[in-house]
Image (cartoon, rainbow, N blue to C red):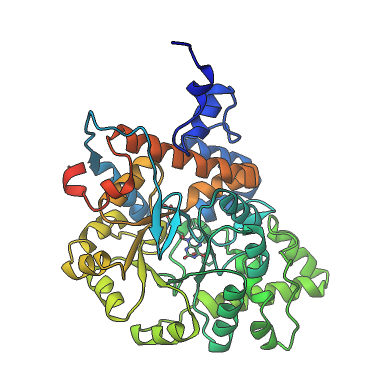
């Protein structure tokens, strides 16, 4: 038998190819690490002159207890591998709303990406698009809907709505998202107020107040009409997202555009995340103005998941917003396990009419396996991609997404499974909790 060196490095499965190539070519990942703690430490170091921006991303509500709970619950659940099952040809493909994706991973809607890297959302949407990982765009983006849609190219994309107080602005945003190729709408329910975040209070750091994270508003005709202004062009972005002090200086010096951006930014937070508490009945309005699937993000209780079914929405994201909203909250993974105990939820999911996604605390491939075994069809990934963005822009994000997906595919195979279908909803067989 001849030794075929070529085949030793040619992968059978798609995502782990990245790892094998990296070994074969002795080329470390562009981030220099696949270790999440190291990634966070390096991002902190890189942003050392912008501790406020780093803390905005990394930080959580109150005493960080919810974020700690999120991780603890993942530690408590453990995978039990099985042996002598063929997992040579592995796939982590997943079908959601009738679309087949090459993995269950989504880029979570994370606002103000421009505070960690000047390319902001263009870099992350570009990276996700290149890999076919669905990108969920935040209403608090530092780039317009149109610009993010273009950067994402032919990649799959969903739009996350912070529900504006004014209906005409909501309708305008939904129309723009449809036109720019966003296919599903994610309505975030847990941020009718921003959480109590002690680390941001001494520095009074809130990006919106510096005109940062309001590009969806600044480029929106309905929002700008309220001030008798024309919308900014679709490629607009905050001129100094790294340096809010500079904006203040410009305002002091009488710079009209700077003053206008600050004013529009402050009003945008009022329009989107400042105190409008909605009710279940009001979802009908969004259904009326959106053609595609509607997903509620921030569901933590079985009763709320059941109400979501009653109100005819297409799916939920079980999430506590990465622990950034309610301190002392149950972990998101525990919430998922409880929600999946509801016979009504299980029946709706099995019928294909109700999709269950998950986020808050996903860091590794094993975490994805645990969430899928507990009943999640897809998972959203938050802070880690922001650290990768801070370090290396688009290239860094691509690297980081590939890394977690390679980890998933390898860990799935080693656990004795070749597809996610084999583990989906099978927590009783595959996992144990202590
Ligand atoms: C800096 C930052 C900004 C966020 N902005 C939004 C947002 O605009 N809309 C939203 O629905 N969720 C937002 N989230 C929450 C994420 O979508 C997601 O729920 C959370 O980050 C998942 O937890 P993880 O960071 O532990 O992965 C944000 C999270 C972070 C860290
Ligand atoms: O900080 C957040 O968690 C968040 O959701 C948000 C909300 C408004 C603007 C930027 C981020």
Can residue 431 be seen at all in this image of the molecule?
Answer: no
Question: What is the count of numbered marks?
Answer: 0
Question: Which residue occupies the foreground of this view, 55 or 371?
Answer: 371
Q: Residue furthest top?
A: 1
Residue 63 image-quadrant placement: bottom left
Position of residue 417 measured from the top left corner of the image (x, y, whole percent): 29, 39
Residue 14 visible in the shown view: yes
Q: In which quarter of the image is the N terminus?
A: top left
Q: Residue 15: x, y in percent?
A: 47, 39
Which sits in the foreground, 86 or 301?
Answer: 86
- The percent coordinates of residue 159 (x first, y second) are 52, 68
Classify 9 as above or below 370. Answer: above
Q: Residue at x 63, y 47 (%)?
A: 394
In this rendering, position of residue 267 left or right of residue 231: left
Q: In which quarter of the image is residue 376?
A: bottom left
The one nearer the camera, 113 or 52, is 113
238 lies left or right of 287: right
Q: In what quadrant of the picture does the C terminus appear?
A: top left
Q: Residue at x 27, y 80 (%)?
A: 310
The picture places residue 238, in percent across and down from the top left corner, at 71, 64
Q: In this view, does 316 lie above or below 133?
A: below
Quick check: 170 above or below 252? below
- Taking depth in this image into account, of 413 and 239 the one nearest to the observer is 413
In the figure, 16 relative to 192: above or below?
above
Q: Residue at x 62, y 66 (%)?
A: 213
């Amino acid at each position: 038998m001849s030794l075929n060196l070529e085949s030793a490095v040619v992968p059978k499965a798609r995502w782990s190819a990245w790892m094998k190539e990296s070994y074969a070519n002795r080329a470390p990942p562009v981030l220099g690490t696949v270790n999440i703690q190291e990634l966070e430490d390096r991002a902190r170091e890189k942003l050392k002159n912008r501790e406020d921006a780093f803390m905005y991303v990394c930080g959580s509500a109150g005493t960080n207890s919810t974020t700690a709970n999120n991780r603890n619950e993942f530690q408590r659940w453990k995978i039990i591998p099985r042996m002598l099952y063929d997992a040579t040809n592995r796939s982590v493909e997943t079908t959601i709303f009738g679309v087949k994706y090459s993995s269950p991973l989504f880029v979570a809607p994370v606002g103000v990406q421009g505070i960690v890297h000047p390319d902001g959302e263009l870099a992350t949407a570009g990276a996700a698009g290149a890999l076919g990982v669905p990108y969920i765009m935040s209403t608090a983006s530092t780039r317009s809907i149109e610009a993010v849609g273009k950067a994402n190219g032919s990649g799959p994309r969903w739009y996350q709505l912070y529900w504006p107080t004014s209906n005409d602005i909501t309708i305008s945003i939904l129309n723009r998202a449809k036109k720019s190729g966003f296919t599903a709408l994610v309505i975030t329910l847990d941020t009718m107020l921003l959480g109590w975040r002690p680390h941001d209070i001494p520095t009074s750091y809130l990006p919106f107040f510096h005109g940062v994270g309001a590009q969806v508003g600044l480029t929106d005709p309905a929002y700008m009409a309220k001030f008798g202004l024309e919308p900014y062009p679709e490629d607009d972005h905050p001129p100094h997202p790294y340096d809010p002090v500079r904006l203040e200086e410009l305002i002091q010096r009488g710079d009209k555009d700077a003053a206008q951006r600050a004013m529009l930014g402050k009003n945008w937070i009022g329009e989107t995340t400042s105190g409008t508490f909605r009710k279940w009945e009001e979802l009908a309005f969004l259904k009326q103005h959106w053609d595609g699937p509607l997903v509620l993000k921030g569901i933590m209780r079985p009763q709320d998941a059941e109400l979501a079914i009653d109100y005819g929405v297409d799916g939920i994201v079980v999430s506590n917003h990465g622990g950034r909203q309610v301190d002392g909250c149950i972990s998101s993974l525990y919430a998922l396990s409880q929600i999946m105990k509801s016979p009504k939820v299980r029946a709706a999911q099995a019928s294909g009419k109700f999709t269950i996604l998950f986020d808050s605390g996903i860091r590794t491939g094993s975490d994805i396996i645990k969430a899928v075994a507990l009943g999640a069809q897809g998972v959203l990934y938050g802070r880690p991609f922001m650290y990768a963005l801070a370090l290396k822009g688009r290239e860094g994000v691509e690297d980081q997404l590939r890394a977690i997906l390679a980890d998933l595919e390898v860990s799935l195979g080693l656990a004795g499974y070749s597809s996610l279908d084999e583990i989906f909803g099978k927590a009783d067989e595959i996992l144990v909790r202590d």
